[in-house]
Image (cartoon, helix red, strand yellow):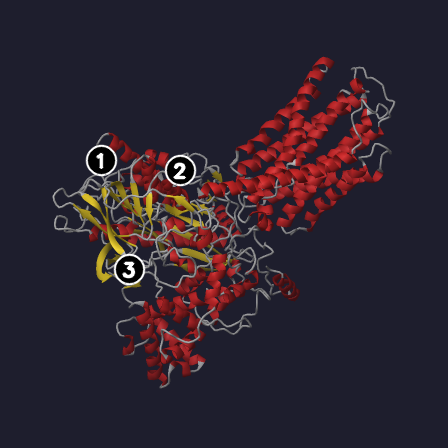
Amino acid sequence: MCADVRANAGDYAVGDALDRPRATGGRAPDVFRVGGWVPMREFRDDEAVDFVIVGTGAGGGTLACRLAEMGFSVVALDAGPYFRPLEDFASDETEQTKLYWLDHRITDGANPITMGGKNSGKAVGGSTVHFAMVSLRFRPEWFRSRSALGYGVDWPLDWREMWKYYAAAERALSISGPLTYPWGPKRPRYPYRAHELNAAARVLALGAERQGYRWTETPLATVSAPHGRSPPCVYRGFCRFGCATNAKQSALTVWMPRALAAGAEIRDLAMAGRIETDPSTGLATGVHYYRDGEWRFQRARNVVVAGYAVETPRLLLASQTSRFPDGLANRSGLVGRNLMTQSNQAVFGRMEQEVRWYKGPPSLTISEHWNYEDRNKDFFGGYCWMAQGPLPIEWVTVQTGARGLWGERLREEMTHYNHQVGLKMVGEMLPDERNTVTLADEVDQYGLKVARVTYSWSDNDKRLIQHALDQMHESLSLAGATHLFRQEDDTNHLAGTARMGFDADHSVVDADCRSWDIRNLWVCDGSVFPTTGGVNPSLTIQAIALRTADRIRDLAARGEL
Amino acid sequence: MNSRGDQQVASLGGLLAVLTGVAVCALVASRNAGRRPTPPIRRHVSVPATRTSAVALAGAARTLAACVACDSAVEHYRGAFHNKSMWLPLISAGLSVVANGSGMKAQGGRSRSRRVVNQLALLTGLVGSGFHVYNVTKRAGGLSWQNLFYAAPLGAPAGLSLSGLLGLAAERLRAMPVDQRAVDSDGTDAAERAGRALAVLASVGIGGTVAEVWLLHLRGAYHNPAMYLPVAIPPVAAISLAHAALGEQLPVLVAHRARRARRWLRLTTVLGWLGSAFHVFGVSRGMGGWRNWRQNLLGGPPVPAPPSFSALAAVGLTALRLMERRKHD
Amino acid sequence: MTEDRYPGYDVLSKQAGLSWNEATRRTIEQRLDIRQEPQFFDAGQWQTLGALCDRIVPQTGQRPTVPLAAMLDARLTSGRTDGFRRAKLPEQGEAWRRGLGALDAESQRLHSRRFHELSVAQQDALLLAVQRGDATCEAWGDMAPAEFFSHRVLLDIAAAYYSHPSSWSEVGFGGPASPRGYVRMEFDRRDPWEAAEALEADPDSALRAERENRRVR
């Protein structure tokens, strides 16, 4: 169909993971050992498995593991390679862009979203392979933000039930966090202790204390003491470029090994192109996917889409038929709508002391003050801010992007690298039907229509951002930083585009992540978020996946699958 | 299966590390033992219990000082000796090792230099505690878990003070007149009272060490069940020792309690050395293992710390001997 | 030019040590082994690009020069992309070819000379105009000059420079770090395998820092 369909085109120096599938012939890579393998059960394409899952990140990876452990037959497809971190990961920002989804996309709108490292992943394990490991719970009120806080829409999930699944996810991921968390209802002690703070994190603490706000150590999915085959974190600081230590508790190192042990099959470098539906029953029958030079078709009794907020609607829209002319599960017309990102603005400054923010996980401290404080706000939604530790390329991109620096000025600024500090927000943006993922006419290397991602900030978004920038500015300056400047244009995580809800007219899936229209089609990733909250989404995605697995087990037991 | 093979390799490496650790500890211990005069009084009635106890105490003071010297060397090196006074515990503890080593001979009387060195250790420990408290409280978060876990350890300098106290006690015992047989109105003599005081000191010392271990093993999330041992066994030893010293002093009861305390103290002694071996294994589990010792020795579990349990248990055993001196002499 | 803040520090001195793993060694080796002739650009574009790189990241220090134009050419040849395209910009290779041509055309229009023949001051003035969007010649086509400048020129050239070990040494970045990471996380602390900084106020500190930096492995 296409000449070069390498996962990511480019001149990557290390390993053959991108060249040909590794998980074949009854074995899959052992992520904890150089050149290692573990046995893997395999299914035939024409054998209808219980579940074929598209995507193996926070949503799909978690679900694949749990469903396999419950005894279902599971095939999980991922468009990306199956890495062994110990041998495939270089300590290098450029080389490690091989972890991102760099297939072609178009971005537009008044505030086009920068795609790449902050909002995508293309590897077995998805973006958890390179996420910053920040593992936060939603504020309970966010699950009913319309009725409790007056904006957005309510979730069909109850926070008390979610609290249980958060705890389960935190246990499974051995989250390292504080002994007591200062905001929200009581939660159990984190399984592992918080990490030692680096100087950049202490600046946040200083600023928050002087502002009179609480702060705490950020709960992180990287272990502070040995766990299983993971050694403790060595504070190398390349977290967002893949953890070559395996201290990071990602879908690749936590859920995939468990899934394989429970009998799931993982197919790497397998790009899903279309979900097939039966014209008479309207039910899904399997997934067309491209692997190892050919298009293939995996038959399945259930299809789960877990490709995140861009690829999930893209696949649903691309699978349209005469029966479903607007794409699958799209009776409400909401597939690809209500795309949300999170505001990720920052304030940076300079300290007299050496900080060397490249050491340690980048966001070791956090203040969630404005997620839990509702007074004195001229906007809806909340935000938190965290300490920062960009590596040189990311840092120069801030200097050129936020300040337009070049020439002597740029090089001079860059020599202050080791004295730099920053606070960066994760802010809630409100759902808006005009923010969309649609199909463009251009096609990618597989011959599939690429996604067009359209995004504009609302007035509320802008007010929230302004508030946060002022607050972070004040905090950083109270902490003693000088030469302050603001990075006003940055966003990160995605959500929405296949929201869950109470009925078929106003949502794509129900509380169990099951599509209203096609009862054997499920969506399990950040796409199902009706609102996005002011915290990083990965833990919530995993908690929802754990719940979905339990619900599937219960439904199956009642014969309602 | 590959992963199993890998685990085998890992556990083999671990075992090897543990064995190496045990060997090193045994070597150190045997050297200590070699220098110690054969203590059991039954064979050498001519050497009084006060004197052999003084020798044993000096030995304990030396082991404790050695732990402090090694531990503060590692930790203060990690702190880049940014404050010149961070050299002080190294110097003081180093002197204590030498001085108390010389106190491990049965012959000879008191030594002024030993006294000064031990007084210095006592003082350095106290000053160090002050520094460490300051270091913790001045940070953002103050007396928070973060700072208790990762800032200067509050309890550690007390180890040096304890070593100084033990060294001084050894000197006092050494000076006790050999022919003293004066029994007080309560039926005890000075040596027995010294024994009881030492027992209390050892109990408190073990208690403090347990507190520090509890804190640091909490930091390690008790990821290995063996990490519960040093917060389970030594407290029993400390309590039974204190019970023997402070409970009703009927000889029958004392003998019974002393027997029980001895069992737990011996277990604590073994645990101290075993702890180091475990920590040697712990360092090997860090990324890059022992090859990356410049990171893992500093970031991993403290290899030289656990034998302080052994030293304090030795004090407890000595104290019991003194308390039951008349039975032996 | 900025004086050397980390005298004698060279990230590459750690290459054989514990901070670099095999994957990193191979990666950096490949980055440093770069062909100096263009494959993606033609000779004219190559001249313009060279002059442009010199203005965006002027390399006047004592450290080895980073072949920015060649690195960018190699990247474009490999086809590695950002993974997306802003609707206002053409695909990256096309954007670069057209942008370099337009830069030359602007230069011809204003000074009747090609961009690389202008004085440094003239080049800077022209680039500033492009950055502000004050470039009007029709060679830009439907591509917004300011958009090209901020989302291609600055992004790509700066990223190329700061992907080079030379720049890491210059800013005192610890560089690759696996299997060995870092131990000392506090303010004003460095591990012995990190760059030592020379303080401006204290001339002796430059010597001390250099001594420390020569020992970095």
- Crowding around mark 3 (Cα neighbors within 10 Å: few <14, some 14 to 19, many 20+) is many
Name the spot of residue A557 as percent of width and height, x first: 25, 30
Per the image, the residue denoted by label 2 is A184
Name the spot of residue C167 as percent of width and height, x first: 50, 66
- Crowding around mark 1 (Cα neighbors within 10 Å: few <14, some 14 to 19, many 20+) is some
Numbered label attached to residue B136: none
Q: Is residue B207 left or right of residue C32?
A: right
Per the image, the residue denoted by label 1 is A561
Element class at badge 1: loop
Per the image, the residue denoted by label 3 is A105
- The residue closer to the viewer here, A56 or C199, is A56
Name the spot of residue A15 as percent of width and height, x first: 42, 57
Mark 2 touching mark 1, by CB under 8 A?
A: no
Comes first in the chain, label 1 or label 3:
3
Q: Would you say residue A530 is visible in this rendering?
A: no
Image vertical order of residue A399 relative to residue A358, above or below: below
Q: Amino acid at mark 1?
A: Leu
Image vertical order of residue B238 relative to residue C19, above or below: above
Element class at badge 2: loop
- Quadrant of the rendering where the C terminus of chain C is positioned: bottom right
Extreme residue in the bottom direction: C112
Structural distance between the alpha carbons of marks 2 and 1: 36 Å
Q: Residue at x 52, y 74 (%)?
A: C60
Q: Nearer the viewer, mark 2 or mark 3?
A: 3
Q: Is residue A495 left or right of residue B144?
A: left
Name the spot of residue A423 as percent of width and height, x first: 44, 53
